[in-house]
Image (cartoon, rainbow, N blue to C red):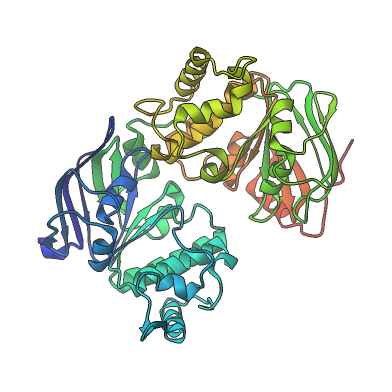
Amino acid sequence: MSDSQYSVQMRNITKTFPGVRALDDVSFTLRPGEVMALLGENGAGKSTLMKILSGVYTRDSGEILLFGTSIEGDLNPRKAQALGVSMIHQELNMCSHLTVAQNIFLGKELTRGSLLSEREMNQQAKDVLDSLQIDIDPTMVLGSLAVSKQQMVEIAKALQSKAKILIMDEPTSALTSVEITQLFTLIRKLRSTGCSIVYISHRLEELQHIVDRVTIMRDGKFITEQPFSSLTMNQIISYMVGREIKEKFPRIPANRGKLTLSIRNLNAGRMVRDISLDLYQGEILGIAGLMGAGRTETTRALFGVDPKESGDIVLEGKAVTITCPEDAIEAGLVLVPEDRKRDGLCIKLSVRENIGLPNLDILCNKAGIINRKRERTMVKKAVQDLGVKLPTSEVDASSLSGGNQQKVVVGKWLARDSKVVIFDEPTRGIDVAAKVEIYHLMNELKQNGIAVMFVSSEMPEILGVSDRILVMCDGRITGELDRSEATQEKIMEYATRFEHKLENQN
């Protein structure tokens, strides 16, 4: 194809951050009216490459051509947008307190004289939403909408800006199956209009529904570019990680020990209703259910993030009172939260500080002074045990890939004598190889006699990793399954029992 037949050509792109070569002589092409999957492990350089294309980062060297025209000088977000490039980031970058229309026109507001023309913006916003068959009132406050609807608004914003190249970074990570179907319908519609789409995702099973070609990166380098139809899933994974992953859900047999955690009649708001469960040493208890079933709310209530109305918690035979996370940590119950950036990390602090922060009671002497040697030993062990990829423990947590950030969140708890570790969606937004490492970690905890609770929205993951499965619906436990009898069909049956509740056996 000639240069003019490509919407994007990136040639020999390099980018270095302090101590890290993020991109090493990478090339990438995109055609009009196609969906290109950009794949690779966390840290492979996918998001960095697309942030260069969208003007967030500047390239150290290399050439960028848009619609056959070489881009001279550095791109910035405004310049990239003017050239038709728009990126929808994994963490949506919008103003939740403004209306839908105000967000769509943010930075390019319509005015009459010195006043905003709200009526005209509302009408034009409605026109672009209608053209995409998105049923959203442009006068609604954005923050009142579900995440999926906010994502649709960001797509509408990009198209109102005349975007010809749309980059989607993990667009389905927080969506339900119904919302994913709606997004795919929208993507197909955009493709039919000639819009070029770059689709970054770790959910490989999604690709068959929308993708034309695949570009795979590894360790900051271009590996291959092929039609999706010519690749098997195992080949894609092998290209991504540089080796064949023989077992997607590594698992060791359960050697269940004594009862560690017993919860009776826990209530905390509308989404945690009369929860009773038992958790044993050396087992992984999976918590399944649809979005809004109350799984995350249950973990937050147990960890003391959200207030409890009633209920008893017994840990290793002793009743414990947990009113805040500090109480839970002291008791030996810790949480790896669903939103690692908001709740699990201080992203402006270093990896060393993130690992040390919840362990100051271990690291400090009686005078409150940190023992730096002990801290270095703790951090080094956490980094090595989990295989965290980083140049030095002094780098900010924000500079790490999603998978490495998740490892840091887990690592800070491994230094403690934790009795119960709760994982809430631990593999969301991380690649196949990093997922396997998290599974190995959970198995290691299980082998060491630690009780593990595990919330996941991915059915194969729940079935593959758990020893025992509880299913929630409408804030209640509606079913319990041993791994040997669990199937997707049985889980879904319990996950949709809105009017039933499992009678807890004492």
Image: 323 above or below 373? below
Q: In x, y percent, where is residue 274? A: 84, 48
Total marks in image: 0
- Give the image quarter of residue 286: top right
Q: Left or right: where does residue 2 sit relative to residue 215?
A: left
Closer to the camera, 310 or 134?
310
Quadrant (top left, top right, bottom left, bottom right) of the N terminus: bottom left
Above or below for 215 versus 160: above
Q: Residue at x 46, y 41 (%)?
A: 430
* Residue 117 x %, y %: 42, 84
Q: Nearer the viewer, residue 349 or 492?
A: 349
379 vs 81: above or below: above
What residue is at 43 percent from the left and 25 percent from the top?
387
Residue 250 seen: no
Picture residue at 33% right of the left edge, 68% below the top: 191
Res 4 visible: yes
Say left or right for 502 vs 464. right
Q: How far from the left and from the top, in percent, is residue 324? A: 72, 38
> Which residue: 28% across, 57% down?
54
